[in-house]
Amino acid sequence: MKIELISGLNRKAPAAILLHTENLRILLDAGGALEPDEALWPVPANIDAVLLSHDHIDHIGGLHRIPRNVPVYCSHITAQSLPAGYDIHCIEIRGRFRIGGITITTGSSGHAYGGVWFHLDIAGGIFYSGDISMESMLFHFDPPPPARIALVDASYGFYDTPQPQQLDKLRQHLQQPCLCPVPPSGRAVEMALLMAPEKQASIVMDEPCRLMMQQMAQQNDGSLRPGVPEALRSLVQNLPLFSTDASLLLVSDPDGMNGMAGVLRARHDFHHRTLFTGHLNQLAYQQLLDGEVDFCRWNVHPTLSCLKKLVSLLSCDYFAPLFTALDNTARWQQVLRCEIITLPTVERELCQ
Ligand SMILES: [Zn+2]
C-alpha cells in the first residue's frame, strides 16, 4: 500500500493522487493547469480507476490525458463536464460503492454542485476531501467517518476569517458596479442567493451560471442544503436577463479572461470593477498588485477552524494539507495535533 501525491502537495496545484493497493492503482482526481504555462503532472501508467471529486478545472481538467478505457467514478453532475468517450460510473453524493475489494464511501463536500469527498476502507481509513467547505449556505457538508490518514484541501493555509465577516467586506466592494468572475457550479449561485435579497434588481448572471442555477433549482442531488432548490426557483423567476446595466455581474470564467468576462473586460465602454473572490492565477494576482482589479475572498475552502473540526471528526493520525505551501510544518503539527505528511510518497509503514 502506497500513496503518491503526484500533484497538489506543497502548493496550489492541480489535484492528482495515486493510491497503490496490493492489486489496484486508483487515481484521485485528474486536475488541469491553473496557470497557462504550468508544467503538467506525469500521468501514471496502468491506472485501474479514476475517482473525481467535483467539476472544477483543477480537479478534472487533466482527465483527457488518461486513457479512455479507464473507468471513471464521479457524480452525475460532475459527469456533465467531462470529455466524451469515457467509461463513466455515476456515484451517489452520499453513498457507497466498491472497486475490487475496497469499499468507498462518499459524502457531500459542501464546495460544489455534485461535489463529493471519498473515504476508502483501507490502511485504517483514507479520507480524500477533494475541495471542501463547511461554511456554505448553499451546499450541504456531510461529516466523514473516522480515517487514519487524511488528505485534505487546505487551500487557505492558516487563514481563519469566518464567512460572515468576509460577507461584510464583500458588501463594501459591491457598493460600486462589479464584475465577478466565478465558477458556475460553486460561488456563482451562492453569491446570487445571498446577495439577491439585498440587491434583487441589480444582479445578473451570464448563461452558464444561469443554466447551472436552473439545474440546481430543479434537482437536489444531495449536495444542496434543504430548502435551497425552492429558494432558487423563486430567484430564477425574478433574476433579470443579462445586462451591463446591472450593478453585480456574475460571469462564468473564474480566471476572468474568457467567456463573457473576457468580452466585457476588453470593451472600452465597460467600467464595472473586476472583483475576484477565489483563487488568483499569476496574471490576476499581478493585476491586483497593479490596482486594476480587486479581491475579496468568498470562503469556499476550509478555514483553519474548519480544518480543526474536520481533524476531530476524522480522528486521523496523519494529515496532508493539500493545495497550500508547506513552509511551516511545525505550526500545522501544533495546530492540528497530528503527524503532517510533507513528502510526496507515503510509504508502506505508515499505510499498514
Ligand atoms: Zn473546487
Image (spheres, grey):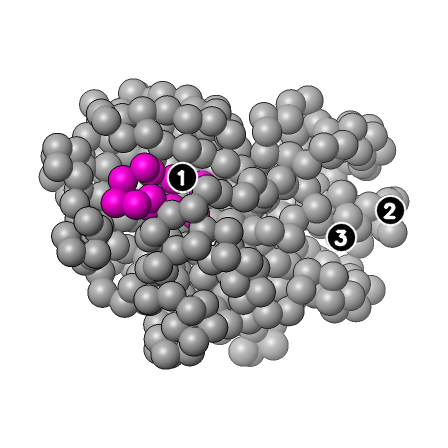
Residue bearing the label numbered 1: 118
Mark 2 Cα-neighbour bin, 10 Å: few <14, some 14–19, many ≥20? few
Residue 332 horizontal/vertical position (percent):
41, 72
In primary-sequence order, the first of circles 1 and 3 is: 1
Q: Residue at x 50, y 51 (%)?
A: 313
Q: Of discs 1 and 3, which sits in the foreground? A: 1
Whether residue 129 is in magenta: the answer is: yes
| 136 and 23: which is toward the camera | 23
Q: Considering depth in this image, is 229 or 43 the residue closer to the camera? A: 229
Q: CA distance from mark 1 to mark 3?
A: 35 Å
Residue 257: which numbered mark, if any? none
Viewer-proximal residue among 76 and 33: 76
Q: Residues within 10 Å of mark 1 (few under 14, many from 20)?
A: many
* Marks 1 and 3 close (CB-CB < 8 Å): no
Q: Position of residue 342 (x, y in %)?
A: 27, 67
Q: Is residue 332 left or right of residue 306?
A: left
Q: Quadrant of residue 123?
A: top left
Which span of residues is magenta-colored? 117-130
